[in-house]
Amino acid sequence: MKSDQLKACIEALRAFHQEKHHELNTSVSSELTAIIAALEDRQEAVASKPRVSYETCQKALELMAKGLSVVTNLSALIDQFFHSD
Protein backbone atom coordinates (compact mmCIF):
# COMPACT_ATOMS: atom_id res chain seq x y z
CA MET A 1 0.00 0.00 0.00
CA LYS A 2 1.39 3.37 -0.94
CA SER A 3 2.10 5.86 1.82
CA ASP A 4 -0.38 8.41 0.50
CA GLN A 5 -3.10 5.75 0.20
CA LEU A 6 -2.45 4.58 3.75
CA LYS A 7 -2.63 8.17 4.98
CA ALA A 8 -5.95 8.65 3.17
CA CYS A 9 -7.31 5.42 4.69
CA ILE A 10 -6.28 6.52 8.19
CA GLU A 11 -7.89 9.93 7.70
CA ALA A 12 -11.09 8.33 6.39
CA LEU A 13 -11.27 5.95 9.35
CA ARG A 14 -10.63 8.81 11.78
CA ALA A 15 -13.35 10.92 10.17
CA PHE A 16 -15.77 7.99 10.20
CA HIS A 17 -15.01 7.29 13.86
CA GLN A 18 -15.33 10.93 14.84
CA GLU A 19 -18.60 11.34 12.96
CA LYS A 20 -20.23 8.11 14.13
CA HIS A 21 -18.62 7.41 17.53
CA HIS A 22 -21.83 8.21 19.42
CA GLU A 23 -23.79 5.74 17.27
CA LEU A 24 -21.33 2.84 17.51
CA ASN A 25 -21.33 0.00 19.99
CA THR A 26 -18.53 0.44 22.56
CA SER A 27 -16.72 -2.68 21.36
CA VAL A 28 -16.88 -1.55 17.72
CA SER A 29 -15.60 1.88 18.68
CA SER A 30 -12.73 0.33 20.65
CA GLU A 31 -11.83 -2.01 17.81
CA LEU A 32 -11.90 0.86 15.34
CA THR A 33 -9.59 2.88 17.58
CA ALA A 34 -7.21 -0.10 17.73
CA ILE A 35 -7.25 -0.51 13.94
CA ILE A 36 -6.50 3.18 13.44
CA ALA A 37 -3.60 2.92 15.91
CA ALA A 38 -2.25 -0.18 14.14
CA LEU A 39 -2.37 1.58 10.78
CA GLU A 40 -0.67 4.67 12.22
CA ASP A 41 2.06 2.49 13.76
CA ARG A 42 2.58 0.79 10.42
CA GLN A 43 2.76 4.14 8.67
CA GLU A 44 5.39 5.42 11.09
CA ALA A 45 7.41 2.19 11.05
CA VAL A 46 7.97 2.10 7.32
CA ALA A 47 7.37 5.55 5.90
CA SER A 48 8.64 4.75 2.40
CA LYS A 49 6.79 1.43 1.84
CA PRO A 50 4.20 0.78 4.51
CA ARG A 51 3.01 -2.82 4.61
CA VAL A 52 -0.37 -3.46 6.16
CA SER A 53 -1.47 -7.01 6.76
CA TYR A 54 -4.48 -8.37 4.98
CA GLU A 55 -6.06 -9.10 8.36
CA THR A 56 -5.75 -5.46 9.47
CA CYS A 57 -7.30 -4.21 6.23
CA GLN A 58 -10.09 -6.78 6.48
CA LYS A 59 -10.81 -5.84 10.10
CA ALA A 60 -10.97 -2.13 9.23
CA LEU A 61 -13.50 -2.83 6.47
CA GLU A 62 -15.56 -5.10 8.73
CA LEU A 63 -15.72 -2.43 11.44
CA MET A 64 -16.79 0.25 8.98
CA ALA A 65 -19.49 -2.12 7.67
CA LYS A 66 -20.72 -2.71 11.24
CA GLY A 67 -20.82 1.03 11.87
CA LEU A 68 -22.66 1.72 8.64
CA SER A 69 -25.11 -1.06 9.42
CA VAL A 70 -25.86 0.48 12.82
CA VAL A 71 -26.44 3.90 11.26
CA THR A 72 -28.63 2.44 8.51
CA ASN A 73 -30.70 0.44 10.98
CA LEU A 74 -31.18 3.47 13.23
CA SER A 75 -32.20 5.57 10.27
CA ALA A 76 -34.77 2.96 9.19
CA LEU A 77 -36.18 2.70 12.71
CA ILE A 78 -36.45 6.46 13.10
CA ASP A 79 -38.15 6.70 9.72
CA GLN A 80 -40.55 3.88 10.57
CA PHE A 81 -41.57 5.18 13.99
CA PHE A 82 -41.50 8.93 13.51
CA HIS A 83 -42.33 9.47 9.86
CA SER A 84 -45.06 6.93 9.30
CA ASP A 85 -48.39 8.16 7.99
Image: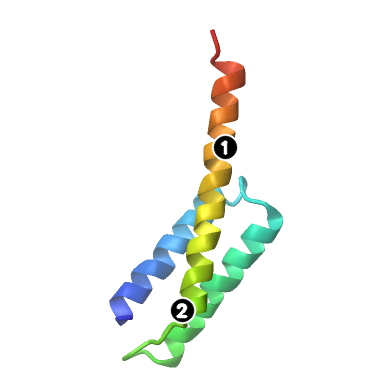
Residue on which the image places disc 2: 54
Circle 1 packing at 10 Å, graded few (<14), some (14-19), many (20+), is few
Relative side of 41 to 28, left or right = left
Look at the numbered disc 2 and give the secondary structure of its residue: helix
Position of the C terminus, as image quadrant, is top right
Position of the N terminus, as image quadrant, is bottom left
Instruction: Estimate the spatial distance between the alpha carbons at disc 2 and disc 1, rounded to whole Å.
Output: 28 Å
**Residue 37 screen position, x and y as percent:** 55, 76
Residue on which the image places disc 1: 73
Comes first in the chain, label 2 or label 1: 2
Query: Of all residues shown, which one is farthest toward the top?
Result: 85
The amino acid beneath tag 1 is: Asn
Look at the numbered disc 1 and give the secondary structure of its residue: helix
**Residue 5 screen position, x and y as percent:** 31, 73
The amino acid beneath tag 2 is: Tyr
- Front residue of 41/52: it is 52
- Front residue of 70/21: it is 70
Q: Residue at x 53, y 61 (%)?
A: 62
**Residue 68 screen position, x and y as percent:** 51, 48
In the image, residue 85 above or below residue 13: above
Q: Residue at x 55, y 13 (%)?
A: 84
Q: Residue at x 62, y 47 (%)?
A: 22
Q: How is the image coloured?
A: rainbow
In the image, residue 70 above or below residue 26: above
How many numbered discs, if any? 2
